[in-house]
Amino acid sequence: MITSNRIADYAMSFALLIVARTLDQALSSALPINMAYLTIIIGISLVMLQQKVWQAAIVGFLFGLSSFTLSWIYQTFFGQNFKNPLISILPRIIVCVLVFLIYHALNKIPSKNPKVKRRIICAVSCGLGALLNTALVLGAICLFTNYTKGYFYLVSTVLLTNALPEFLLSVILTPLVVFGVAKARRINVCGIPYNYRPTPIKDVPIE
């Protein structure tokens, strides 16, 4: 059920994504590239703070919508691709859902130190999310545009050049944001309580 508080949270999330995307655009305005460092960090952080997979999908939609909206405001060489919602919105929905599911899947791995495990799998999930974002956006551009091979190679170079710093920043910074907010607001990470304590692994004596 979507309550008024939830709608307010989504509105705030969209505002944060717009601000992050605008700052990314300002940082890359003098270059023929389309950096999305802050947008990816904020977007994936918001996904990790959702409680259900459908909520992660909504965040993905808002993530893509911010790119779609600003692509009409900032007329850039690379940003014109994001005027197509199949490139700007659809890949982001898929990415955010996958990040949510990856965190849940990795959380099932038993560990004697749940706190450390949660931070590690958060970093892994966020890093994979950044790489998936690059891969799926690049794939969407390949599928849904009619540009020449030369243009596609140029776009590929730009995206792959950004992939490494986006990956590193996501791995390092996103978990700090996620667990900082989770601890301050006493909320769950991907629907799993912040103070989650699974059944500890029992040492089996060797006979």
Image (spheres, rainbow, N blue to C red):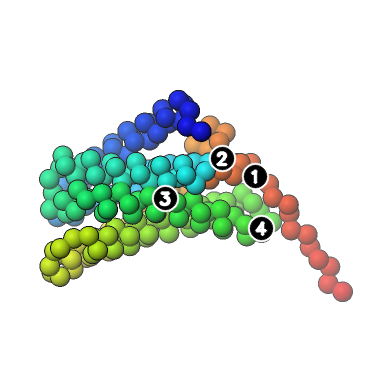
Q: Earlier in the sequence, mark 1 or mark 4?
A: 4
- Label 3 to label 2: alpha-carbon separation: 17 Å
Residue under label 2: 188
Judged from the image, the secondary structure of the residue bearing numbered disc 1 is loop
- Label 1 to label 3: alpha-carbon separation: 22 Å
Residue under label 3: 96
* Residues at discs 2 and 4 in contact (Cβ within 8 Å): no
2 vs 4, front mark: 2
Residue under label 4: 111
Looking at the rendered structure, the kind of residue marked 2 is: Asn
Looking at the rendered structure, the kind of residue marked 1 is: Tyr
From the top left corner, tell me how far across and down residue 177 is, in percent. Answer: 45, 42
Q: Earlier in the sequence, mark 1 or mark 3?
A: 3
The single residue placed furthest to the front in the displayed view is 1
- Label 1 to label 4: alpha-carbon separation: 12 Å
User: Where residue 196 is drawn, which disc sits there?
Assistant: 1
3 vs 4, front mark: 3
Judged from the image, the secondary structure of the residue bearing numbered disc 4 is loop
The single residue placed furthest to the bottom in the displayed view is 207
The single residue placed furthest to the right in the displayed view is 207
3 vs 2, front mark: 3
Q: Quadrant of residue 11?
A: top left
Q: Earlier in the sequence, mark 2 or mark 4?
A: 4
Q: Residue at x 66, y 59 (%)?
A: 110
Q: Earlier in the sequence, mark 3 or mark 4?
A: 3
Judged from the image, the secondary structure of the residue bearing numbered disc 3 is helix
Looking at the rendered structure, the kind of residue marked 3 is: Cys
From the top left corner, tell me how far across and down residue 66 is, in percent. Answer: 28, 41
Q: Quadrant of the C terminus?
A: bottom right
Looking at the rendered structure, the kind of residue marked 4 is: Ser
